[in-house]
Amino acid sequence: MQRFLTTLTALLALGLAACDNGGGGRGGAGTQTWKFAIEEIDGSVQDAYAERFKQLIETRSRGRIKVEIYPYGTLGTSAQITELTQSGAVQFTMASPGHLGSVVPEVQIFSIHFLFAEDESVNHRILGGNPRLRELLDAAYRERQLVFLDAFQEGWMAWTANQPIRRPADFAGVKIRVMNSPLLLKAYEAYGANPTTMAYSEIYSALQLNMIDAQVNPVFAIEEMSFYEVQDYLIFPRHLPFIATLTANPAFYDGLPDADRKLVDEVIHELHGYIFGVQRRLNSKRLDVITGNSDIQVIELTAEDRAAFRAAALPVREAYVGMAGERGRQLLETISAAVAQAEAAGRRDAAAE
Ligand code: 6CS
């Protein structure tokens, strides 16, 4: 009920409760406004993405199309902005697999630990250029009234905690907040932790009040949400890149004139490369801010530590296939094969040098 009321409030705030069918707001003289909701605050990776999207669309359409950005909190939680996009009240939204997993189980492929390469640029190429991955995800999204437009990294997930964590046994009894995905709960249970879900906006006070002991997010978010102020350890396991997906309302996207849909596709293609550089710079700069402003202890897991976590995480892949079915199995095979191929090519290049 609470969720329904918040969504209704958001709809009323948009002035769209009764009228929009996903076509985008029409203005005078053929102008229109596209609403773009993000799951993060001003200054974040998703904000940089949305701002650039707005700039390129508005410039290239010569002002005919206006893009309005709704940062985290202005329209509700991640789940609520997804619902607004499914209904057509919002045209574009960012949807993190961590939250979208309860709506589109297949997307939890992006929450499987130690599946992706340790080299971010390998993952970048797979996410941007693997047609099978995109085809499978788009089919899964469309069954749930969404269009899959892109998936991109926002940086490595890092753990913050009140105690050092180097091996799965260190997680025993640790209450860690994860995004609202059944697979993420399984992933941390596999390490022996006590995972729990809550909204992004509630993490800081839950840490401060010791309702939770740990959380997991990329560095830029740990800085801008101030989580580092209320935690003693910042741990880099490199178990998972944070991967966001960009989605749109299907009736809106499919109903666009060809030239406008081409414009959207072209801008999204350019942004895949743009945002990769942005997140790298932002995460590196924000790590300096965190270490400069606090006495948090930074721990980089060794190869041996990571191997212990990897072994504990492997059975979770079965759980993923159980949740995501045949399409999930195909996604798992597609990504495993693409990573293995890229890593083998990297080893061949290194040997040839
Ligand atoms: O932890 C979360 O819920 C959020 N973290 C980030 C970095 N982006 C969006 C997501 O909702």
Image (cartoon, rainbow, N blue to C red):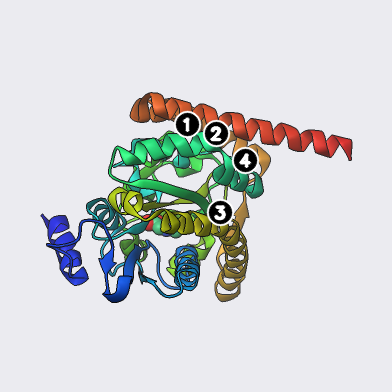
Nearest to N terminus: mark 4 or mark 2:
4
The picture quadrant for ligand 1 comes to: bottom left
- Look at mark 1 in the image and give the residue it sits on: 331
Sequence-wise, the earlier of marks 3 and 1 is: 3
Residue 16 vs 324, above or below: the answer is below
Circle 1: residue type: Leu
Residue at x-position 38% and y-position 36%:
139
Spatial CA distance of label 4 from label 2 is 10 Å
Q: Amino acid at mark 4?
A: Ala
Q: For marks 4 and 3, give the CA distance.
A: 18 Å
The residue at which mark 2 appears reads as 335
Give the residue at x 26% y 63%: 76
Q: Which residue is mark 4?
A: 117
210 sits to left or right of 267: left
Residue 299: x, y in percent? Answer: 61, 54
Residue indicated by mark 3:
235
